[in-house]
Image: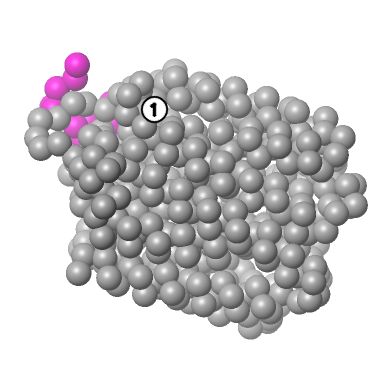
Amino acid sequence: MRSAASVDSARGWVVVAAAFAAMAASFGIAYSFGAFLEPMAAEFGTGRGATSAFFALTSLTYFGLGALSGVAVDRHGPRRVLLAGGVALGAGLAATSQAGSLWVGLLTYGLGVGIGVACAYVPMVAVVGGWFERRRTLAIGVAVTGIGLGTLAVAPLAAAMVDALGWRTTHLVLGLGGAAVLVCCALVVGRPPVRPGPAALTLRQAVRDRDYRRLYLASGLLSVALFVPFVHLPGYAEQAGADRVAAAALVGVIGLASTAGRLLLGLVAARTGALRAFRGCFLVMGASFGLWGLDGGYGVLVAFAVVLGVGYGGFVALGPAVVAERFGTPRLGGLLGVLYTSAGIGSAVGAPLAGAAVDATGSYVPVVAGCLALGLAAYGVTLRVGR
């Protein structure tokens, strides 16, 4: 059993590096799906709404199973959880590359990538949070920058690979690479130190807490809107005249901006407090959809991606810090896992509805307007947290 002296130690930063790599690989693959949307829809003869179900099932799986993977890491440690995620990710994408129908691919992709991300995200955020106290916000911020940089690197790479190799081979290559990264990360991570002090709230106590329920509602509302651009922004950009790689690169821009947001808003939180900065992230993300609605060409879409990404980066980095401050760290994995099921539900609803709306109307205007309204409503809910 490690002592409290290990908190904020060099060993903790090794865990941060492993968390960074695991999130870069898993989220980079998950958020590259926009590059696969059009070629898969064309091969299977489906519309955007049906094909978007791939992303919806994936996000529902990784956020929904976060409740289980979070509890698992609290009980069994991160190594076994990451190994399970690596196996699922590799096997799922290998099976998807051989799918003969949309629904077979939907099942293999959604479960494989979903389980892989579920094992890499909530567990590793919780483990990093447990390794730090004074520098917790910074450490989590650095770890989750892996999501942004992974998205920046993998989304345009996937688009280029799809053009050169086809979507099936690209899935196979990404699956093998992602699995290898998660297995390597599993070899270097360890349980966080055991620290003396009062016990954290149990899950049962937390779900009865008004602030926890408000955080759940706000995250759910926001997530309906937040994940729509990851699926549909590349298709919108192509429709507006951008080529496939440039369109897919917009998702990478969101990832790059989110990296800056995680670090910059972490510094802001050190001065304003994590909760106040967290609220600001909701406002920035909700308002950013107004830029998408301007229909001003590729440059405006880049600006939208930057603003959304900055807010998204802070949202991801500061959420665990807010939960840790208000509810404690010994059961942080389970607390975060249950909280993130709201994001799973929201993301599962948003992308397919958006795709169906575009198919039905031929326009993205209702989608963008709905995202703007939901984002601002989520911000309004966060204003009630802590009051």
Instruction: Using the image, determine if residue 82 lies above or below residue 363.
Output: above
Task: Tell me if I can see residue 143 in this picture.
Answer: no
- The quadrant of the image that shows the N terminus is top left
**Residue beneath the point at 60% across and 53% down:** 348
Left or right side of 120 for 333: left
Against 40, residue 373 (above or below) is below
Q: For the C terminus, give its image quadrant.
A: bottom left
Q: Residue 68: where, in percent of width, then height?
A: 43, 34
Count of numbered tags: 1
> Residue at left 32%, top 43%?
335
Q: Position of residue 355 (x, y in %)?
A: 72, 63
Indicate the quadrant where residue 322 lies: bottom left
Q: Quadrant of residue 364?
A: bottom right
Q: Is residue 195 left or right of residue 128?
A: left
Tag 1 residue:
72
Residue farthest to the left? Answer: 197
Q: Residue 168's quadrant in the figure?
A: top right
- Specify whether 148 is left or right of 100: left
Residue positioned 45% across, 53% down in the render: 342
Question: Left of 225 or right of it: where is 55?
Answer: right
Q: Which of 187 and 381 lies nearest the eye of the viewer?
A: 381
- Magenta: main secondary structure: helix
Q: Position of residue 314 (x, y in %)?
A: 39, 58
* Residue at 34% in and 53% down: 319
- Dot 1 surroundings within 10 Å: few (below 14), some, or many (20 or more)? some
- Extent of the magenta region: 1-16
